Amino acid sequence: MAELLTVARPYAKAAFQFANETSSLDKWSNMLNFAALVVQDQVMADLLSNPKVTSSELAEAFKQIGRDSFDESGNNFITLLARNKRLSSIPEIRALYEALKAEKLQSVDVEVTSAFALSDAQIERLASALKTNLKREINIESKVDQSLIGGLVIRAGDMVIDGSVHGKIAKLTETLNS
């Protein structure tokens, strides 16, 4: 995984720099999201791993699939990735690009997992508190996981706040076992 991130980082930075300079951050997000979906398709994965398929054939196949989703700069990016045999790293490029975009826009995606569905008012209060603490715009995605028993697990980037009953029981068990 670390190797894929190392390979993907310069491409993500280049895509972000170009998108930022051309005021097309959202357009590039959409192109990279679509490209990541294409790479994860089993038929395309088989093509990418087939040594008989040339880089130019892969690039053309990608461009045909994404003809409605890629502009000229997106097609050029796909061609560059194909030439350098880096098409399979598109999901990592997309993730790194989105992190750079979020940093630029001073926003963070937050995943809130709770034992029960949260009301809109609860989500708003949580977003307000997180915005104050993190000093960024907050984009909350709420999920339900009944195995938590109660409480919340909040994930924002590499920060995790586990306030769930399940997490507290796990900590207590670990403490008692040591």
Image (cartoon, rainbow, N blue to C red):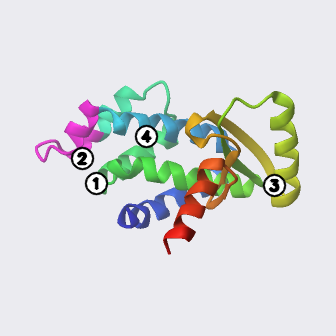
Q: Of label 3 and label 1, which has the lower sequence position?
A: 1
Mark 1 residue type: Lys
x then y, percent, for residue 80:
38, 52
Contact? badges 2 and 1 (CB < 8 Å) = yes
**Residue at 68% over, 31% down:** 116
Which residue has dot 2 on it?
Answer: 55
Q: Nearer the viewer, residue 57 or 159?
A: 159
Residue closer to the observer: 82 or 106: 106
- Tag 4 secondary structure: helix
Alpha-carbon span between mark 4 and mark 1:
15 Å
Label 3 CA crowd tier, 10 Å (few <14, some 14–19, many 20+): some
Front disc: 4 or 2: 4
Q: Which residue is mark 1?
A: 85
Cα distance between the residues tagged 3 and 1? 37 Å
Residue 176 in picture, x, y percent from top left: 54, 69
Residue wearing tag 3: 136
Q: Amino acid at mark 4?
A: Ala
Residue 31 highlighted magenta (yes or no): no
Residue placed at 82% from the left, 52% from the top? 130
